[in-house]
Image: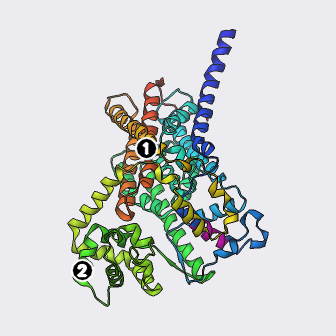
Amino acid sequence: MSSQGIVGGLAWRTGPFLLLVAAILLCLAVFVVNHGPLYYFDTGSYFKQGNATLSLILPEDTQSAGTVGANQIAQTDDTTNGSRSMIYALLVAVFWRLDALGGIALVNLAAVLLSAWLVVRAARRTGLLQRSGMSLIAIPLLAAAVTALPFYIAYVMPDIFAPVLLILIAAVVAMGREMTLTERLTALALAALAVVLHPSHLAIAGLMLPLAVLAALLRQGSGRWFAVGFVACLVLIGFAERKAFEVAAETVAHKQVVYTPFITARLIVDGPGMTYLDENCPRPDLATCALHEALSWSDDPYRLTAAHIIFERSQNLGSFLLMTPEDQLAVAQEQRAFFFRVLTAYPFSTVAALAGNAATQLKMVSVKMTIPTQAVIRSAKSLSGLTDDSLTVLDRGILARDRSWIATADRVHAALYLVALVAVVGLLLWPGLVAGQLKVFVLCLLAGVLVNALICGGVSQPADRYGARVIWLLPFAAAFLAAAATAPHRKGRQTAGVDI
């Protein structure tokens, strides 16, 4: 081989590798610039819950000096919150105890890289592509890493696993038949982890199941129902984990698992729930009437927001948390039945409210909620149950000291999302430009973004945190399609020799 050929071969191999290194560094940029992880007020609650469980295995006196004072976290009531994942709580507690909370950023990055790797492995068999596997991983991640992705890599909250779950479901729906057994099992393990890290992820998997069924019905040949079984298995794993958590809480900790009544609060704020309560309360067989009464204790209009109903403790804005523990428990346990009562009584207004919230959620994509305010910092410290000298990790962030840059970042990101959306639509509609299964993959991603908006905006409350956590899938998808469209194609079906 000539020296020119050797140089060309090295360039062909090192170029994709350098692209991948650049993508990884850019994904970690926010973590590096911030001098540590980003967090939300609920990060403190995750630590408190996880550390309480961890203390059953590892007593407090074996902790590092960085977590002295954690004995203040013990819960005194006979309930535990089921709206937070115990698995994620344990993960936060382990890293926090080790004074290495930033390690969660590496876990987040690893999950994103692994999901992208699985997509590329299948795409190189299905899409008949000759482009380097490392390039196909790096190019979409580079596009996403100039938007919201690095903020969620650095975020000590389970949000990054929502888009990871969507990537994996989309990959299996579009290309699951071409995956090897090892790849299928890896995808199932990572997707199952994502499902159990937050209740909203389980709901997303549940709503993606009909999409998998539709894709199977539109296909021919063997293996078309694999994706249906895959998503159904994720839903079963999610429910099994919830049940196991409830049993463990009752038998080991002697606590009853209670889920925060987000659905009830959402229905009340949107109108149909309040109308139903106005017409039916007081009523002995309707526990939510207690919340209806609590909402009348103040005439401050700002108390009628979902966040204030659920979390506020002040006399002017609070309601749910001002009720007796018995009434709180009854309202929380009734929220599913209350939803169906309201839906039956006012089907059109309830569905319209859900759709309106989802539409609002789609427009909320700022990264501002990943950057803690002073109020969030105080709340995270308080909810962690630790003493102030144990909370230096929460004071290391640089990005929170001056938030003026966020507005500029949001404008740049919004422009990039718009460009990405136009590019995705154009690439999908251009005849013969992209392999059909890659189109299915991207369409599933777009459907996942809509499902995320419906779950988070409709059930909880429209918030930038929920929208920004998945919107980076737009530039990711656009770059992936562009890389696939511009890559050389083989004449035959590629089934072997798939690198990376």
> In terms of depth relative to the viewer, which is nearer, 61 or 215?
61
What crowding class fits label 2: few (fewer than 14 Cα within 10 Å), some (14-19), or many (20 or more)? few
272 sits left or right of 238 in the view: left
Image coords of residue 163 (percent x, y): 48, 50
> Secondary structure beneath disc 2?
helix
Residue 57, quarter of the rendered image:
bottom right
Please say if 120 is above or below 251.
above
What crowding class fits label 1: few (fewer than 14 Cα within 10 Å), some (14-19), or many (20 or more)? few
> In terms of depth relative to the viewer, which is nearer, 192 or 322?
322
> Which color scheme is applied?
rainbow
Q: Which residues are magenta?
A: 45-53
Is any atom of residue 169 visible in this view? no
> Secondary structure beneath disc 1?
helix
Q: Residue at x 38, y 51 (%)?
A: 364
- The residue pinned by badge 2 equals 278
Image coords of residue 138 (percent x, y): 55, 34
**Could you tell me the amino acid type at mark 1?**
Ala
The CA span between labels 1 and 2 is 41 Å
172 sits left or right of 90 in the view: left
- The residue pinned by badge 1 equals 407
The C terminus lies in quadrant: top right
Image coords of residue 141 (percent x, y): 52, 38
The N terminus lies in quadrant: top right
Q: Mostly what secondary structure, the magenta segment?
A: helix
Closer to the chain start, of discs 1 and 2, is 2
433 sits left or right of 108 in the view: left
